[in-house]
Image (spheres, helix red, strand yellow):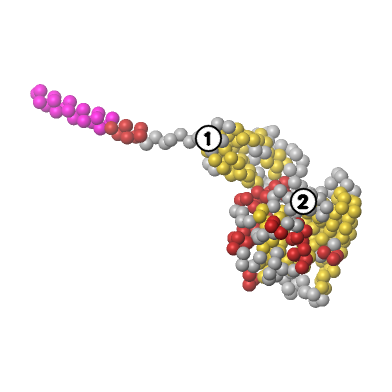
Amino acid sequence: MKGKLFRIVFRLSVVVVGISFLLFLGGGCSPTPVSTGSIQGVVTDNQSGESLAGVLISAGNVSTTSDALGNYILNKVPVGNREVTVVLEGYSSQTKTVEIIENEIIELNFQLIPLSQENQRVVMVELYISIGCHSCELVEPILEQLVEEYGFDHMILVEEAAWGEYSTLEISDRYKWYLPDSADRGVPNILFNGINENWIHGYANYQTIKSKIDAEIAKGTKISINTSISSNTNSTTISGTIENISDSTLSNLEINGMVFKEQPTVNLKYSVFDIFEEQKVPVDSLAPGDIIDFSFTLEGFNWETDNVHGVIFVQAPDSPTKEILQAAYIE
């Protein structure tokens, strides 16, 4: 009897020890706590300034929605550089990158652009390149992808050969006008509505370039452009109007344009071959509501058969950034 009791106690002891060992191992596999911080801000309409409720704000696996006043807070966001994306039906989505610091609250506000918004700002992106430039070949498809995503009513890309094949005297002169110091005129150079703080010299990834475009769109526009085109086998005429839709007088502007076409042998889809420098229209002053007519006559190619496209843009050449206020794509 005693032997039997001993065997039972022994087996129970083995079971208890085994369970304790498994619990010990399990405790050793507990995940290490992740350092986190928080993001808070407000989401508004970029034109009216009104607060936007029900906006989805996400950073990785962390998400929330804005309240009735457009306010939001994202807690427990892992530290490091994080992309924050906001989405609301009827508006263009927007993504920004922010550095999360442990136990700190970072403020990050968003101004969303209505998809149906008339007279929205169009970003004219000038990519200065040269044939055979490795970094140019890396950044060019990123920009061409972004054109497809945004559409020409949000973004217009022109590819300007700074030198060599497909370069022209007008392109070279424009590049020097933007960047008088030859040390700055390497390639690639990406300009967003002029030579402003968003200028990128060298390679940049998709998200970096997209953030620059979004920043320009968010500024809104002061100019509206309307265009029409007529062409035959010998010449093409682009005409139209610009209107000051802002509340202030605009001074020292120029109406200018470019034409571009695909160069399939070197994979350039938006290769500029003519700038309207000799025909550009100076505008000394444009009061709120004022409208100015313009007309450009182009010769030496057939618009239809040569698969040519163009852009009309209004630029402030004397401003510190040589800002392009608005642009319009010509089919």
Please name the amino acid that badge 2 sits on. Answer: Thr
Residue toward you, 128 or 55: 128
Please say if 162 is above or below 107.
below
How many badges with numbers are in the image? 2
Query: Is 321 positioned to the left or the right of 93 in the image?
Result: right
Write the start and end of the magenta stretch as one range: 1-20
From the image, give the main secondary structure of the stretch colored magenta.
helix
- Visible residue check, residue 172: yes
Q: Quadrant of the C terminus?
A: bottom right
Q: Does 10 appear in magenta?
A: yes
Q: What residue did someone put label 1 on?
A: 36
Residue 330, given in percent of the width and then of the height, sits at 77, 63
Residue 114 is labelled as none
Please say if 87 is above or below 167.
above
Q: Quadrant of the N terminus?
A: top left
Q: Residues within 10 Å of mark 1 (few under 14, many from 20)?
A: some
Q: Residue furthest top?
A: 2
Identify the residue at image location x=21%, y=27%. Answer: 13
Residue toward you, 285 or 242: 285
Q: Residues within 10 Å of mark 2 (few under 14, many from 20)?
A: some
Earlier-in-chain disc, 1 versus 2: 1
Helix, strand, or loop for circle 2?
loop
Query: Is 281 positioned to the left or the right of 104 in the image?
Result: right
Quarter residue 25 falls in? top left
Q: Residue furthest bottom?
A: 233
Query: Badges 1 and 2: C-beta atoms under 8 Å apart?
Result: no
Helix, strand, or loop for circle 1?
strand
Residue 318, given in percent of the width and then of the height, sits at 83, 52
* Measured Cα–Cα span from mark 1 to mark 2: 39 Å
Residue 307, given in percent of the width and then of the height, sits at 72, 71
Residue 321 is labelled as 2
Quarter residue 165 falls in? bottom right
